[in-house]
């Protein structure tokens, strides 16, 4: 081993570039899920209240197809990034005490269930 290069097992995780990359991808994928939730808010039908009906204010009672398409793309990218990150972590973690990244399983589950729900109820 090169004496200049530090052993990754002895190097702190903050200085490990692979660990920082996986952490960054994890953060971006969670951020994409938050963006998808915002897009979902604009995609769903508006709730038309009795007051709106009384005053004659129109409300959209159908899903916005443009926003639904963006939502599907965001959720697919989020799911893909979560799966790639899980794969990268599984290749790197080899010891028993290494963490599994439960948050990635949760993120992938949320994305997958959301995609299935949109596919069944909207599209």
Image: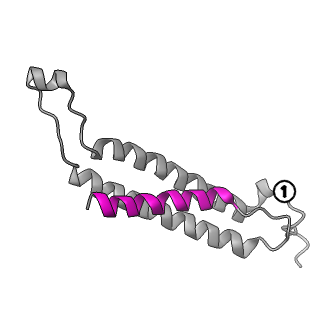
Residue 98, percent from left and from top: 81, 64
Residue 115, percent from left and from top: 40, 62
**What residue lies at 81% left-to-right and 74% top-to-bottom?**
94
**In which quadrant is the N terminus drawn?**
bottom right
Q: Vertically, is 119 above or below 57?
A: below
**What residue lies at 53% left-to-right and 64% top-to-bottom?**
81
Residue 15, percent from left and from top: 78, 57
Outermost residue toward the front in this view:
50
**Which is nearer the eye, 76 or 18?**
76
Magenta residues, start to end:
101-121
Q: Quadrant of residue 50?
A: top left
The kind of secondary structure the magenta stretch mainly shows is: helix
Q: Vertically, is 94 above or below 16?
A: below
Residue 23, percent from left and from top: 65, 56
Outermost residue toward the left in this view:
56
Q: Is residue 99 magenta?
A: no
Q: Is residue 121 left or right of residue 85?
A: left
Q: Is residue 98 left or right of residue 47?
A: right
According to the picture, the residue beneath numbered tag 1 turns out to be: 12
**In which quadrant is the C terminus drawn?**
bottom left
**What residue lies at 42% left-to-right and 46% top-to-bottom?**
37
**What residue lies at 18% left-to-right and 42% top-to-bottom?**
61
Q: Is residue 54 left or right of residue 75?
A: left
């Amino acid at each position: 081993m090169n004496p200049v290069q530090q052993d990754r097992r002895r190097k702190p995780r903050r200085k490990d570039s692979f660990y920082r990359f996986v952490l960054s991808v994890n953060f971006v994928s969670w951020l994409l899920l938050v963006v998808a939730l915002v897009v979902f808010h604009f995609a769903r039908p508006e709730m038309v209240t009795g007051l709106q009906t009384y005053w004659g204010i129109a409300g959209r009672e159908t899903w916005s197809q443009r926003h639904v398409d963006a939502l599907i793309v965001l959720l697919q990218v989020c799911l893909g990034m979560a799966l790639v990150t899980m794969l990268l972590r599984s290749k790197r973690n080899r010891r028993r005490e290494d963490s599994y990244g439960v948050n990635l399983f949760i993120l992938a589950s949320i994305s997958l269930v959301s995609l299935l729900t949109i596919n069944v109820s909207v599209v």
